[in-house]
Every structure is written in structure tokens, then in C-alpha cells.
Image: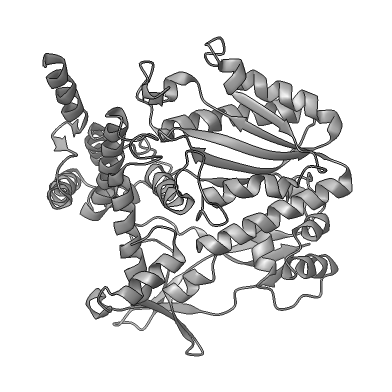
Amino acid sequence: MHEADLFLYKIDKSLVIHDLNLSSTPAEIKVFCENISKRCGFTIAEYGQNKTSYQICQGIANRYTIQIDSYNADKPFIPTLNKLACSNWWFRKINKLRIQYIEQVHRKLNLVNKDASCYASAFALENRKTQLENSFEYLMANQIVNEDGQTYTLLDVYKKSVSNPRIRKAELMTRIRGFEEVATKMGHAGEFYTLTSPSKYHAYSNGKANPKFNDSTPKDVNEYFNNNWKLIRSALQKKNIHPYGFRVVEPHHDGTPHWHLLLFMHPDDVKTTRSIISKYALREDGNERGAKKHRFDMTSIDPNKGSAAGYIAKYISKNIDGSDLDDDLYGNDAKPAASKIDAWSSLWGIRQFQQIGGPSVTVWRELRRLQESEQPEVVTAFVAADSGDWAAYVMAMGGAILPRRNRPIHPYYETKVNETVDIDTGEIIQNNLTYYGDVKAPSIKGLINKSVINLTRTRLWKKITQPMTTFVPKNESRNKELVKLHPIPI
């Protein structure tokens, strides 16, 4: 009994950071954020927008495990002070912490595994449902209008973009098939690898809590893989090996991520590539039992037995919407399982899919928006992109392994500037700053080839914000619409 009480005490203590209790309700968290932002605001008012205020407020943020950059007089620091004095900024940061800490408690209590709740807890799924509902209502309640009066809801825009899971899935499969066609043409070999982390990173093992578990979060484990991959890429480059393909990150049943890699390369490079990846996969705790068997699984793709695209298709489906599948690896219905994986990815901020090598997908997407061009290289790439032929696009852009800086077409960006009118003077004031005072990030405007700019975004759009109260109430048809757009049932 004493051990159980001690365990619960430790769990409760793990949700407290200084005077912040993360088990508080969202309303209580909001009050906390209002108070902490006022404290920072009073500090700035007392000492001014300078190093002293910055360092005091930085100390307050660090106290709650929120990291901000160290003070640097040569870099803009006032935007950071503006954020620290904003309750909304604090709420976004603290609420994210709250959700992740509570999910980690679920993992420690063995509530995230194949015997309880695969991939993510019921709490995480409910949180994701709420998030999607709020996003859906925002998209419905806001519109954009251009200079010709054309008006669309943000939901209309979302449906046609790669943010829509179904479009994202279709584009991923198009790119994978295209890479495979390029590999076939070039005589390259296809390899499928799976990387698994050391046992200490797994919360649940062999049907019970893992005694070796070091309390790492899924985000920590994914960072472990990212760091390892940087070393692997560097080692491969030193050997002049440049694989291309895709990476898929998905969770084990206990939420611990593992990586799948579909890579194409020259047949002569396969042995060296395997050796290098194996070396880094076993770099940490490589002598533990089962490490050599489970850390790095390698399979050569035999075209006579099936396509590379077909080999990875189930991983793409499983991690987006579960369509075309009956069950996941653990016998769960694939579609609800995809909902859990989506909640897991969103909660921990894990990027599920990433292209390795090859030309820019941004250029591909902008080419599909292009109306006309007189440049031969741009026209060739446009024809390929417009017809959805990723293989032809890769070849038009210089092949699969050419460094991006040497490719013929690049994205063209401009800094978006808002214009406001000074009522007293009539002067037009251009503002390229964000709400907090940061310089706005450049926006994609088109493509550039040999110093010639090809604009793909020529219309000026303005957002029309409507009060959320004007939005239609929740009903069955609205729920069906939301389910169409996302695998999670609401």
C-alpha cells in the first residue's frame, strides 16, 4: 500500500512545475497565464525593454521549462518581450506542456499500449477531437476574398490543399511511385529499412511495464533518431553515397516512435549503406540483448515480388486514414487506429513523412499553379508536374541525386507587407512585422530560373473574419462533413 501511495505521489508531483499544476483545468491554466504575463509586463514596465527585463523574464520562462534564446543585443529581442507579456502566448506554451505531461503520465501508468489504448491515450484522442472541431469551425467561419470579389471559405481552400489528408496521401504515393520509376530507369536498387530505438526508450515491453524505461517522451525518442540520421547522412556523403526516397515515422503500440526508410541507391552502395546505418543504430547500448536483431531491419526490394510503392503503401495508409486496410499490426480496426496515430503525431509534434533527396516538392506544387512561361526548362518541368508525373519532373530537375542548389528551378519568395493608412497624414505605412514585432517570414510567390521570376501567385487575397457565433450549430450533416475531411470521427 505504501509503495502504491508513493507511486501516486510521484505521478502527482510530476505534473507540478514550481507553482504551476498541470492537472488544473484549462480555465485555471488561463488565469495562471494571465498572472504570469502580467508579472512579465510589470517587469518590462519597471526596467524598460532592455537586457535586464529580458533576463528576468527569461528566468521566469525557464522556471516553467519554457526555453527562449539567450539575450543578444545584435538580434531583435523586443518581439520576445512582447510574447512574454502576452497571456495568449503563455497559454499556448503552457497548454502544450500540460497535454504532453498528462499523456506521459498515461504512458507511465501503462495506459498506452496494445492491451489498453494503442499509440495514444483516450485523453489524447479527445483532445485531438476538440482541436479538430475548433479548427473546422474556424475554417467555416472565415473567408478570403480577392480583388475580383471571388470569395471562398477557408474550408474550401483546405479541401484543395495538401493539408487535406486524402490529397496528402495521393501526393505521397505519386512521389513514391515516381522515385521508383526513376530508380528502375537508372538501374538503382530499392531498400526498405526499419530503425528501432534502444530498450530503455520503450515504456512497455513483453506485455508489461519496462523496468529499464528512462521516462523519455516520444518527442525525445524521435530526436534520438534525428541525431542519429544526421550522423548517418554525413557518413554516407563522405562515401559519396546519396540515397533518395522517403522516411515514415510511426509509433509502436506504447507510443515510442520507430522509423521506416524506403531508399533507392546504386547497387554497389547497398553493402556500405547497410554497414553505416547498422553502425549508428547500435552505437547506443548496442550490446544489450536483442539489439542486433531488432535495432536495424533491412530488406532488399525484389521487383519480381512487388513494387516498392506497394511495399510502403500500407505504412502511408496506416498513418493517414487507414483506408485500403482492414487491421493494423496489432489487430485493431485500421481507421480508428489511424485516428490514434494522428492524435499521437499532433500531440508530440512529430513529422510523420519526409522526402529524402530528390528535387523540391515546393517547386513541384508551384509548377502546378503556373499559368505560362517562356523558359524551356520551366516548361519541361511544368508539363511533368501538371500531368502528375513525378519521375519526369525529377529528370527535368536534373535527376534524383543532384544537390538542390544546382537544380535549374528554385522557389521564389517575397516578404509579405501589410499597408495601413495614417488617418491624420494620409501616409501609406508599410508594415512587414508580425503581431509581436518579428519580421515576417518570406512568402512563396513563384519560381526562379536563371534569374527570371515566374510568378504563380498573382492575386491579392484578404481574410474576412466572421464572429464564431454566426457559425451554424453542431448537427449531423456538419459532423459528416468533418469526418470526410479527417479520419478521426467526431
Q: Quadrant of the N terminus?
A: top left
In the foreground, 283 or 233:
283
Residue plotted at (16% across, 20% down): 4
**What residue is at 84 percent from the left and 40 percent from the top?**
188
Residue 187 horizontal/vertical position (percent) = 88, 42
Is 388 positioned to the left or the right of 303 in the image?
left
**Is 321 situated left or right of 97 in this image?**
right
487 shown above or below 342 = below
- Residue 324, image x and y in percent? 57, 56
Q: Is residue 57 above or below residue 320?
A: above
Image quarter of residue 103: top left
Q: Residue furthest bottom?
A: 148
Q: Indicate the position of residue 42 as horizontal and vertical percent values.
A: 14, 47
In the rendered view, would you say 275 is above or below 113?
above
Can residue 239 be seen in the rendering of this structure?
Answer: no
Which quarter of the picture shows residue 363?
bottom right
Q: Nearer the viewer, residue 108 or 404?
A: 108
Task: Classify residue 194 by image quadrant.
Answer: top right
Residue 145 in view, yes or no: yes
Q: Position of residue 58 (x, y in %)?
A: 27, 37
- Residue at image point 14% right, 46% down: 32
Residue toward you, 90 or 286:
286
Residue at the image point whose x is 32% and y is 64% from the top: 133
* Count of numbered badges drawn on the protein: 0
The C terminus: image quadrant: bottom left
Color style of the picture: one colour
